[in-house]
């Protein structure tokens, strides 16, 4: 069983989520329901739940502020929120789950199953640390990516380039490791820091710190430090040359 705390300032949302969890997610035991972040913080610190369902926009203290003030952080976190671009970007950066209100039952069941799997294999506070780094507008150092075995935490400085593979993305590291991730290249373009990572082609994003040289052409090509040669599209050529200071 996963012991869960639910936090939302709207009682109707709390009741709806509780009902859906009780009916469709038998592995969840609700140990506390809170209609404000202050009480939520107290219950999390004292009860030390396995999973927290958290609304973001709440009066007095929102969900992000509450997370920054927590003492106990070793739980799986699932956001239940209305859509907000910046918030969702930060959440996706850390590979945390979010559910958009009104919560769909199938999406809820998938999120709970993922939390259950992550609980068995990953340090729960690592994702939260990445999220808080992003929210505090610090230069992010790591990204959390979902793999077939769980979650992989990767230092951004070790990523050399990314390659599209249909609805998946291959991530290549400087130590020649490769990870296949069930996210599109567009997803990574939206969340990776643009001052370091450049989209040079519909198939590739590169870390400009690993560019060895540029070969002229219609779009041209970049030679990476590991010897890999990648095409630059005509449409991206000017943007690429400006980004590398040409």
Image (cartoon, rainbow, N blue to C red):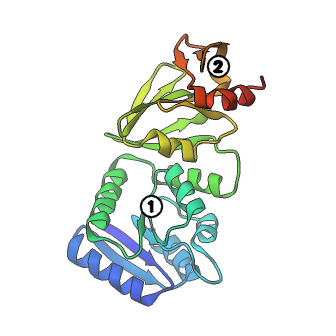
Disc 1 element: loop
Instruction: Residue at 60%, 60% (x, y): give it.
Output: 86
Give residue 97's position: percent from left, percent from top: 42, 59
Q: Is residue 242 left or right of residue 118?
A: right
Residue 213 makes an appearance in the image: yes
Instruction: Residue at 37%, 71% (x, y): give it.
Output: 4
Q: Is residue 103 left or right of residue 173?
A: left
Mark in front: 1 vs 2: 2
Instruction: Residue at 31%, 52% (x, y): give it.
Output: 117
Q: Which residue is mark 1?
A: 75
* Residue furthest right as drawn: 245
Give residue 22's position: percent from left, percent from top: 25, 78
- Res 244 label: none
Question: Could you tell me how many numbered marks the image carries?
Answer: 2
Disc 2 element: strand
Q: Is residue 218 above or below residue 7?
A: above
Examine the image and state in which quarter residue 212 appears: top right
Badge 2 density bin: few <14, some 14–19, many ≥20, Cα 10 Å = some
Task: Give the position of the C terminus as an image quadrant.
Answer: top right
Q: Earlier in the sequence, mark 1 or mark 2?
A: 1
Give residue 49's position: percent from left, percent from top: 42, 68
Which one is nearer the viewer's eye here, 203 or 57? 203
Callout 1–callout 2 Cβ contact below 8 Å:
no
Residue 49 makes an appearance in the image: no
Q: Is residue 179 above or below residue 121?
A: above
Give residue 9's position: percent from left, percent from top: 51, 85
Q: Which residue is mark 2?
A: 211
Q: Is residue 114 above or below residue 26?
A: above
Examine the image and state in which quarter residue 234 appears: top right
Q: Is residue 20 left or right of residue 94?
A: left
Task: Give the position of the N terminus as an image quadrant.
Answer: bottom left
Instruction: Residue at 71%, 25% (x, y): give it.
Output: 241
């Amino acid at each position: 069983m996963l012991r869960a705390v639910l936090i939302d300032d709207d009682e109707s949302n709390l009741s709806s989520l509780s009902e859906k969890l009780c009916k469709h997610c038998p592995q969840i035991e609700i140990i506390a329901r809170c209609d404000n972040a202050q009480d939520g913080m107290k219950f999390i610190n004292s009860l030390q739940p396995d999973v927290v369902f958290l609304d973001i926009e709440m009066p007095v203290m929102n969900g992000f502020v509450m997370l920054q003030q927590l003492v106990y952080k070793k739980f799986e976190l699932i956001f239940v929120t209305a859509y907000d671009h910046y918030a969702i970007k930060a959440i996706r950066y850390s590979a945390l789950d979010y559910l958009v209100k009104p919560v769909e039952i199938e999406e809820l069941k998938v999120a709970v199953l993922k939390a259950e799997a992550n609980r068995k294999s990953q340090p729960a506070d690592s994702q939260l640390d990445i999220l808080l780094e992003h929210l505090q507008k610090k230069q992010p150092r790591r990204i959390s990516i979902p793999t077939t075995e769980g979650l992989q935490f990767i230092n951004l400085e070790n990523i050399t380039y990314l390659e599209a593979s249909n609805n998946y993305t291959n991530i290549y590291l400087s130590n020649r490791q490769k990870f296949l991730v069930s996210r599109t290249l567009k997803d990574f373009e939206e969340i990776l820091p643009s001052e370091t990572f450049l989209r040079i082609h519909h198939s590739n994003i590169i870390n400009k710190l690993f560019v060895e040289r540029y070969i002229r052409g219609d779009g041209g090509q970049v030679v990476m430090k590991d010897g890999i040669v990648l095409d630059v599209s005509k449409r991206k050529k000017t943007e690429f040359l400006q980004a590398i200071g040409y």
